[in-house]
Image (cartoon, rainbow, N blue to C red):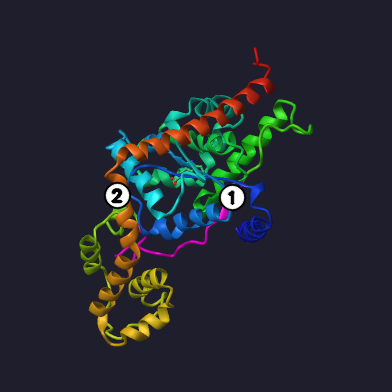
Amino acid sequence: MQRALERSAEIELAIDKDPSQFRVLTGDRPTGSLHLGHYFGTLQGRVALQERGVDTWILVADYQVITDRDGVGPLKQRVAGLLADYLAVGLDPEKTTIFAHSQIPELNQLMLPFLSLVTESELHRNPTVKSELEATGGRAMSGLLLTYPVHQAADILFCKANLVPVGQDQLPHLEQARVVASRFDKRYGRADSKTPVFRRPEALLSKASNILGTDGQKMSKSRGNTIELGMTAQETEKMLRKAKTDADRVITYAPDSRPEVSNLLLMASMATGTSPEDLAAQIGDGGGGALKALVTEALNDMLAPIRQRRADLLANEDYLWQVLERGNQKAREQAVATLDEVRAAMNMDY
Ligand code: TRP
């Protein structure tokens, strides 16, 4: 973990020197709406990479939706919402390639040779898969849940990405992708040659955003404690009115002893750029009510332009589907080229 953090710092410097040596791939499962945790945790970082001139690819991981549930839900609507979120926060389809699993058959086909490179016991050992299985509350492990880290390796490797911005929980998946890449090249005689088929992707660890939900627990849709980018100002106010605080009317920033109050201060701080300590001093002995009013205003002010753009985009869904189609075409060209290389390495180039 420490090593991964140090390496990420080195990579940051290398990006400043020469952004063109990197291709970034990351993505989201379209299972719900993006919220403030996503915004501070990953979306702002993606926009920054894009603006620094890094070739950025973003995957709508629709096939990953069915790893741990029975159906896809209102998938199309969710994908439209996700696309609107992406563009509203500043991802620019002229610079960033946005595409979806289900539209790139050649990416998915990589799953076959890749599965032959990993053992069943390795798959069972993946700690992220284990905790995701636990979170399903007693469901049987599906074959896709067990093997999705290999599919995710295909996501990363097909497009020759060498950088993956991830949270800590995704580190095992990245290791899996590196293992698959090097085993493939070794097995098919590319290990020592100058023509490896795959790059070895590295993690760019996102600084954990530290933002918790309105109840002081991890922000997550299933807990009903999120502030979604697409909520109205009134809905945001209502969520914050329900937020947990404590009995001490003097507001202070003390993450260890006052996690809920401190989390609200942190949200307002991230939205305004003022330190949480200064915000606490401004509120003084105004209590939870004043704190909530301040956070509500800070978040609604920050989100207002994003929400406006989001609503405008959703009013013209055709445009969103065009953006996705363009990204799909580009991703597909890359996937076709990579699969050709894979077939050639495997003597399947008839
Ligand atoms: N597993 C990621 C998530 O749930 C989404 C994802 C799919 C992804 N494929 C990826 C992330 C490849 C990084 C790289 O958020």
Callout 1: CB less than 8 Å from ligand 1: no
Image point (63%, 61%), residue name: 9
Q: What kind of element bears circle 1? A: loop
Task: Please determine whether, in this image, residue 76 is positioned above or below residue 304.
Answer: above
Residue 4, located in which quarter of the rendered image? bottom right
On-image quarter of the N terminus: bottom right
Disc 2 crowd, CA 10 A, few/some/many (<14, 14-19, 20+): few
Of labels 1 and 2, the one closer to you = 2
For the residues labelled 1 and 2, say whether their Cβ atoms are less than 8 Å apart.
no
Which region of the structure is painted magenta?
202-219
**Numbered circle sitting on residue 312:** 2
Residue 55: percent from left, percent from top = 57, 46
Q: What kind of element bears circle 2? A: helix
Residue 185: percent from left, percent from top = 70, 31
Q: Amino acid at mark 2?
A: Asp
- For marks 1 and 2, the one nearer the N-term is 1
Q: Amino acid at mark 1?
A: Val
| In the image: residue 200, left or right of residue 266 | right
> Does any portion of residue 112 appear in the rendered image?
yes
Residue placed most toward the observer, 321 or 336: 321
Task: Please determine whether, in this image, residue 229 is positioned above or below residue 338.
Answer: below
Image point (31%, 67%), residue name: 301
Disc 1 crowd, CA 10 A, few/some/many (<14, 14-19, 20+): many
Residue placed most toward the observer, 7 or 20: 20
Image point (64%, 16%), residue name: 348
Q: Which residue is mark 1?
A: 54
Magenta stretch: helix, strand or loop mostly: loop
On-image quarter of the C terminus: top right
| In the image: residue 210, left or right of residue 34 | right
Q: Is residue 213 magenta?
A: yes
Residue 100, located in which quarter of the rendered image? top left
| In the image: residue 259, left or right of residue 122 | left
